Structure formats: structure tokens, C-alpha cells
Image: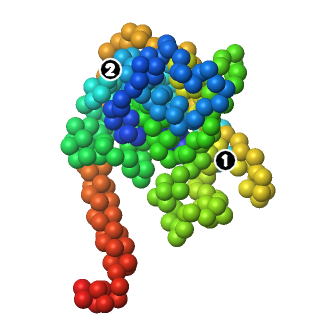
Amino acid sequence: MRISFSILSIVVFAGGMPLGICSGQSTDASSDPAKPSPADTASIASGEVLLDSAIAAFESQDSLSANVRLQVHLLGHHLFGPGKYLQKGAGENRQIRFEMAVRGRAGKFVYTQVNDGRRLWLLEEMIDEKELRFLDLQRLREAGLLAVADISSPQLHAIGLGGLSGLMKNLQLMFRFGRAVRIEWNGMSVWAMRGVWRAEQLGQLISTPDQGDVNEYSKIVSQLPEWAPIEVGLLLDTETLFPYRFEFLRAVDSSSNKASLTPIAIMELLEVRFDAPIEEDNFDRPSNIRPTDITKEMLRQRKKQDVEHSRNTKATNLSGLPDEKLRSR
């Protein structure tokens, strides 16, 4: 069943990295989910502007709950199942619970993330085993790990860490969104938008000498692993800016110059409730089994990455010096 967790990483990959913890200023229109955005009067708007407003709106929410539905079609696997998202409080005291119960040919897989404000608990339940891990959030904050994005640390790709606002912020960091178009979807008025990879983020995943050329960009995207999307799609409510649907897309036929894209994963949020009371025990430790502290592992990875970055930066600077200056060194 471990392959199922690898497939679910397509969602965890963009699942609210620490950027969602950063506070942001919001306007009156975006901070109140009951108020329509000024852009609602138009049929076309900027996707980037709408995402900014949506992130600010969710940062201001005292409580939020929604049911979740996930579908994954990848590597010959078809996974599907329900879940739940809960959010309570604000800032560093924000509590989050995100859980998914996914079924496939190999059986049932349950993945639960609980952020109680002090620790992020990660529980995986498979057919024949359970594993509980946790991150000490205060130690990570002190180390500066929650102040910057690091797409090479899978444990930080937890929706439970940054919540829905972190998920949207992370998508905006990695993907460039164009215009949003107002459409009718399931009887609701929504903003529909697509995002393509930002070249600088691709450079962190795949080494390439040149990311500026369009043809080169296409080659880089074609090298992405099968679980990584080529594009992402979002549907936002036109009034609350709530994200009803996330789509992660890949090309159906990469041999065609005009290959169509199809979702390899879809996450939908349903029955949304704002400001509804949420019981405190939802944010308790999710299991009594013996946990594993992976905080030190994260800190070691960060230190190693800092050393490598410093070495690469120094090498880059030296390579740009004239020969006589290099010899003098």
C-alpha cells in the first residue's frame, strides 16, 4: 500500500507549505467571506489578484469546516475517497485537521494531519500497519524553517501545516496563473483559472542550463516525474473565494503537439461551513501508538541544504570573475 502514499504525494506536494503561516494584510472586501469582491461585477479577472484575495480571506477566518472528496488516476491506480478539513484560530495558534480515507485495488489508506499549534501530527494507517510521526513546530520556527518555502522537503508539504490558505499560496508560488473566467459550475457561480509552472521553481526540481526559451521550457516540463502535474486548475466561489475544486493535470498524449490535458488528481471541498463551532478534541493527538519525532531530520536536511546552497553560490560567483582574479585567489 506504500505506492498509494506515493500517489497521494501529488496532493501533499502542493499541500500548504509553511507559506500559509505568514500573515498578510487584507482589505475589507476580501476579509469578509460574505462580501463579494469588487471583481465580481466582471466576467474576467486576474487569477493572481483573486488568489491574493482568497488567501487573505482565509487568513482572517476564525473557524472553517468542509467535507473533502479526492480522486487520483495515476500510474495505473485509481484511488478515491472522502475526507474532512477543519480550521480554527489564527496565526501561530491556528489549529488544523485534514484527513483522507482513500480506497484502491490494494485496500484502504487513511492519512490524517493534525496541527494543534505546537506540533504537526502525521498519521498513516494502512492494511497491516500504522505510523505516527510529528514535527515540533516551535523548533522549526526558531530555525527559520517555517518562514521560507522549501519544495524539497516532503514533510513540510502538509495541508495541516498551512491550511487551505497555505495550499493556495504554495500553488501561487509554483505556478503562474493567467486570467480567471466566471462560469456556472454545479449551479454555482465560480471563477475558473489555470496555472503553469514558474521557470524558477522548475529549476529547483530539474537542472537545466536555460529556462528562458519556450522550447526549453517544454523540454523541462516533459522531464517532470509522472506524479508531478504540468498545470493546475482552480475553481473559486465568486463571493467567498472559497476553493471548491483543485485539479492537477497531465498531458494525455505527449507525442502530440496539441496534447490535451486531463486531471490525474482532483480534490473537491463540499458542504462548506464558516464560523461554525468546532470541538477542541478534533485537534488532539490522532493516535496513541508510539510516535516518531522527525524534527531533527528536518533540521539536518535544512542545514545540509544551506551548506550546499552556500557552496553553489560561491562557485557561481567565482565563475564570473576574470581569469587574473581567479588566479589571485
Disc 2 designates what residue?
A: 89
Q: Amino acid at mark 2?
A: Gly
Of the pair 243 and 328, the residue shown nearer to us: 328
Q: Secondary structure at mark 1?
A: strand
Say which label, 1 or 2, has the lower sequence index.
2
What residue is shown at x 61% (from left), y 60% (from top)? 217
What residue is shown at x 79% (from left), y 56% (from top)? 256
Of the pair 90 and 33, the residue shown nearer to us: 33
Q: Secondary structure at mark 2?
A: loop
Of the pair 300 and 232, the residue shown nearer to us: 232
102 left or right of 97?
right
Any mark on residue 250, and which?
Answer: 1
74 left or right of 4?
right
User: Residue 26 is drawn in which quadrant?
Assistant: top left
Give percent across and percent down for residue 236.
Answer: 58, 26
255 left or right of 115?
right
Q: Judge the density around disc 1: few (<14), some (14-19), many (≥20) Cα neighbours within 10 Å.
A: many
Give percent across and percent down for residue 319.
Answer: 37, 79
Disc 1/disc 2 C-alpha distance (Å): 36 Å
Placement of 134 over or under 306, stated as above or below: above
Q: Judge the density around disc 2: few (<14), some (14-19), many (≥20) Cα neighbours within 10 Å.
A: some
Say if residue 167 shows up in the picture. Answer: no
What residue is shown at x 58% (from left), y 35% (from top)? 46
What residue is shown at x 36% (from left), y 17% (from top)? 62
Q: Tell me the quadrant of the picture where the C terminus can be found.
A: bottom left
Of the pair 328 and 11, the residue shown nearer to us: 328
**Outermost residue, top direction?**
277
Placement of 128 over or under 152, stated as above or below: above
Q: Amino acid at mark 1?
A: Arg
Give percent across and percent down for residue 42.
Answer: 64, 24
Give percent across and percent down for residue 221.
Answer: 61, 57
Say if residue 310 shows up in the picture. Answer: yes
